[in-house]
Image (tube, rainbow, N blue to C red):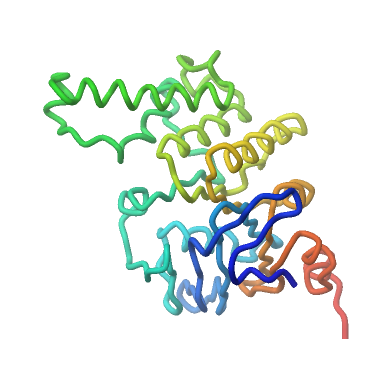
Amino acid sequence: MLDQSQGYTTEDGRKIGGVVMEMRNITLRFGGVEAIKDISFDIREGEIRAIIGPNGAGKSSMLNVISGFYVPQEGQVFYKGAPRPAMKPYQVAQQGIARTFQNIALFEGMSVLDNVMTGRLTKMKTGLFSQALWLGKSEKEETENREVAEKIIDFLEIQAIRKTPVSRLPYGLKKRVELARALAAEPSLLLLDEPMAGMNVEEKEDMSRFILDVNDEFGTTIALIEHDMGVVMDLSDRVVVMDYGKKIGDGTPDEVRGNQAVIDAYLGVAHD
């Protein structure tokens, strides 16, 4: 097993730092149903951490706990070394956590640029009145935020559609715009909920490249849910595996690939 007590170095020479977020004995219930059952794992600075499992394993529920949308009935989430209390979504964003969604959540009637700009809302400090009248600091702030949005648009190679209404875009480009909006918040921890879902092979290759580039060039820590095992094994530094709300595997892609419990969960094989 990989010794991660002081961080670690990946096979390609990248340095992975200390723990950014730790899930300690997380249990989440909906009525009498336990969606997550006493799960512990951590996410380390600079790594790409995958959460995988069959349908109904509890992956999305876990991502919602990580994002602060769900508060577990048992266990504790630690963020940057401190216990994290229940928070509102804007407070989570202010802590440096951003996410994309399994079902695209964009403003369809707005342009690509305007959608990306919404990711800058937590960075805007001037009041509504000042912004409406374009007074003083609001003009400077708007210009600075637009510059950041434009850089992200260039980074994700969507310059040609920057003024196009999102409703006119094909599915794959919408997913890229949603990634751009999340990056506009300049997160230190980026949560991706099935970023490749519904994409063709070419779109998956593009998205995989951008995820690696975000991690490499921005140093962003990434936690993702993904069903495409080829993508997971290629992108991830470490993988945690869930099945029926329980953790059945945790380690490097090679360790998880050879874990019999993981093999059984995916193949539906029962052993004595």
**Residue at the image point whose x is 33% and y is 65% from the top:** 86
Quarter of the rendering occupied by the N terminus: bottom right
Q: Which corner quadrant holds the C terminus?
A: bottom right
Taking the spot 36% from the left edge, 23% from the top edge, the residue there is: 146
Compared with residue 206, is residue 36 higher up or lower down, i.e. above or below? Answer: below
Where 213 falls versus 188 (above or below)? above
Rendered location of residue 26, percent (x, y): 50, 75
Where residue 34 sits in the image (x, y, percent)? 54, 76
**Residue 265's x, y, as percent?**
78, 69
Q: Is residue 221 shown left or right of residue 83?
A: right
Q: Nearer the viewer, residue 248 or 187?
A: 187
Residue shown at the point (46%, 19%) measured from the top left: 165
Q: Residue furthest bottom?
A: 272
- The quadrant holding residue 170 is top right
Left or right: 44 as drawn, with respect to 8: left
Closest to the observer, 238 or 33: 238
As drawn, 36 above or below 49 = below
Task: Indicate the quadrant where residue 81 lies.
Answer: bottom left
Percent x, y of residue 222: 56, 50
Label total for image: 0
